[in-house]
Image (cartoon, helix red, strand yellow):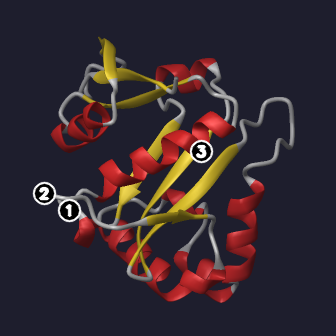
Amino acid sequence: MSSPKITLVPPTEAHRDTFLRGLREFQDEGLPWYIGGDLAEVERDFGAFVAKKLAEATRRTAEFVPSTQLWAIHEEQFVGRISIRHELTESLRRDGGHIGYDTVPSFRGRGVATEMLRLALPVARTLGLHEVLVTCNDTNAASIRVIERNGGVLRETQVLDPTKPAKRYYWIDLG
């Protein structure tokens, strides 16, 4: 299967309608965390939401870890999001890593996440990273495939919470 033609773009008001449609799909699955508030507020002032996402790339405090937010666009539709943290804290080393991504549920199984990660790796390199940590649950076969298809090397698996699946820790060398 060939990967879909997607581009990664910074958050933008131009993709408001398809972003909100994708966000509703995420919320139906219980993934509201990306917006950092409620959907009605995001709909009411989408420009402020976009500005907030763009501002995440700038350090605000010594403890704040900047992250570059990018949206995956396929045929003018928002199909996923990926974030690249510019550095790791101990907490992010344990549970999070440098890169996190989500594919809109109706676009899963089409190679979107694999392509998002492939396109994000050169961006991570421009941020000064030489290797990136990408984590996933041991039970997430789709994410395991995405990471391994992008050169991820499994270095360790840990149980962080006995009531949850083990966490897999992959490193990708950016050369």
Q: Earlier in the sequence, mark 1 or mark 3?
A: 1
Residue 143, percent across and down? 26, 41
In this view, the residue in front, 73 or 166, is 73
Residues marked 1 and 2 touching at CB (< 8 Å) = yes
Q: Give the numbered dot on residue 123.
A: 3
Residue 27, percent across and down? 38, 68
Label 2 sits on a secondary structure element that is loop
Q: What is the spatial separation of the Cα atoms under label 1 and label 3, in whole angstroms?
A: 22 Å
Label 2 sits on residue: 1
- Observer-side mark, 1 or 2, equals 2
Residue 46, percent across and down? 66, 81
**Is 21 left or right of 69, judged from the image as shown?**
left
Q: Amino acid at mark 3?
A: Val
Q: Residue furthest right?
A: 61
Q: Amino acid at mark 1?
A: Arg
In this view, the residue in front, 168 or 149, is 149
Q: What is the spatial separation of the Cα atoms under label 1 and label 2, in whole angstroms?
A: 8 Å
Q: Give the numbered dot on residue 110.
A: 1
Q: Residue furthest left?
A: 1
Who's the residue at 32% across and 19% down the image? 153
